[in-house]
Image: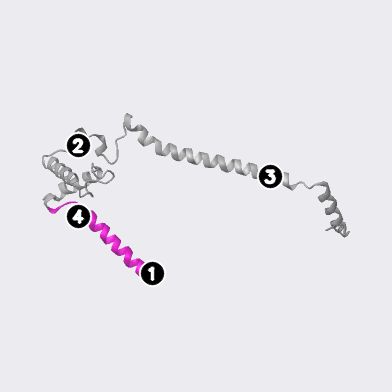
C-alpha cells in the first residue's frame, strides 16, 4: 500500500510539473491580472499541433506562438472576446476547445445528449422485452403435464411412486 501511495505521489508531481513547464518564464506578463486573463484564454484555445490539448498545456512551438499572440493582444487592450474573435478569424473555429453554439455547430452540441438518450431508451426497451419474455416463460413452464399432475397427486396422497424400469 505504501508503494502505491509513493507511485501515485510521484506521478502526480510529474504530471503537475509537465503542465507547469508549458508556459515559459519569458512569456509571463508583469501584470498579474492580465497574466491571469491570458492563462484563462490559453486554456480555452486548442493547440493546432497537439489537437486536444490547450495551448496553455502544450509545449509545441505553435502553442508558444499562440500564447505570445494572446498576451500581445491583451497588452494592446483587447477584451477576451476580441482576442478569441481575432484568433477564430485567423485560424478558424477549430482553434476553440469548446466550440460556440451556432447553427453549423448544432450537431456537435446535440449529438452527445441525443446518443445518450437513445442508448437509455434502447436499454429500457430491452429490459421491458426481457421482463415480458421471462414472465411468459415462467407461465408456460409452470404448467404441469398430465403425467406430472398424476405423480404429484400420488405423492400428496402418500402413495408410493411406481418404480421406473431401468
**Label 2 residue SS:** helix
User: Mark 4 or 1 closer to N-term?
Assistant: 1
Q: Residues within 10 Å of mark 3 (few under 14, many from 20)?
A: few
Instruction: Name the image quarter holding residue 93.
Output: top left
Q: Are marks 2 and 3 in contact (CB under 8 Å)?
A: no
User: Mark 1 or 3 closer to N-term?
Assistant: 1
Q: Are marks 3 and 4 in contact (CB under 8 Å)?
A: no
Q: Which residue is mark 1?
A: 1
Residue range corresponding to the magenta coloring: 1-25
User: Mark 2 or 4 closer to N-term?
Assistant: 4
Instruction: Name the image quarter holding residue 48.
Output: top left
**Label 4 residue SS:** helix
Q: Which residue is mark 3?
A: 137
Of residues 55 and 33, which is closer to you in this image? Answer: 55
Marks 1 and 3 sit apart, C-alpha to C-alpha, by 50 Å
Of all residues, the one furthest to the front in this rendering is 166
Marks 3 and 4 sit apart, C-alpha to C-alpha, by 64 Å
Amino acid at each position: 500500500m505504501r508503494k502505491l501511495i509513493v507511485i501515485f505521489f510521484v506521478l502526480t508531481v510529474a504530471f503537475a510539473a509537465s503542465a507547469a513547464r508549458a508556459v515559459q518564464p519569458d512569456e509571463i506578463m508583469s501584470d498579474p491580472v492580465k497574466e491571469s486573463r491570458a492563462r484563462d484564454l490559453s486554456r480555452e484555445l486548442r493547440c493546432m499541433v497537439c489537437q486536444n490539448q490547450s495551448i496553455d498545456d502544450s509545449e509545441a512551438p505553435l502553442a508558444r506562438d499562440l500564447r505570445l499572440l494572446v498576451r500581445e493582444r491583451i497588452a494592446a487592450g483587447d477584451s477576451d472576446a476580441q482576442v478569441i474573435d481575432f484568433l477564430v478569424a485567423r485560424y478558424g473555429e477549430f482553434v476553440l476547445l469548446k466550440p460556440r453554439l451556432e447553427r453549423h455547430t448544432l450537431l456537435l452540441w446535440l449529438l452527445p445528449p441525443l446518443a445518450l438518450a437513445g442508448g437509455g431508451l434502447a436499454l429500457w426497451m430491452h429490459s421491458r422485452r426481457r421482463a415480458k419474455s421471462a414472465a411468459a416463460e415462467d407461465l408456460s413452464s409452470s404448467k404441469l403435464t398430465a403425467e406430472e399432475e398424476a405423480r404429484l397427486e400420488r405423492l400428496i396422497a402418500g402413495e408410493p411412486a411406481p418404480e421406473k424400469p431401468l
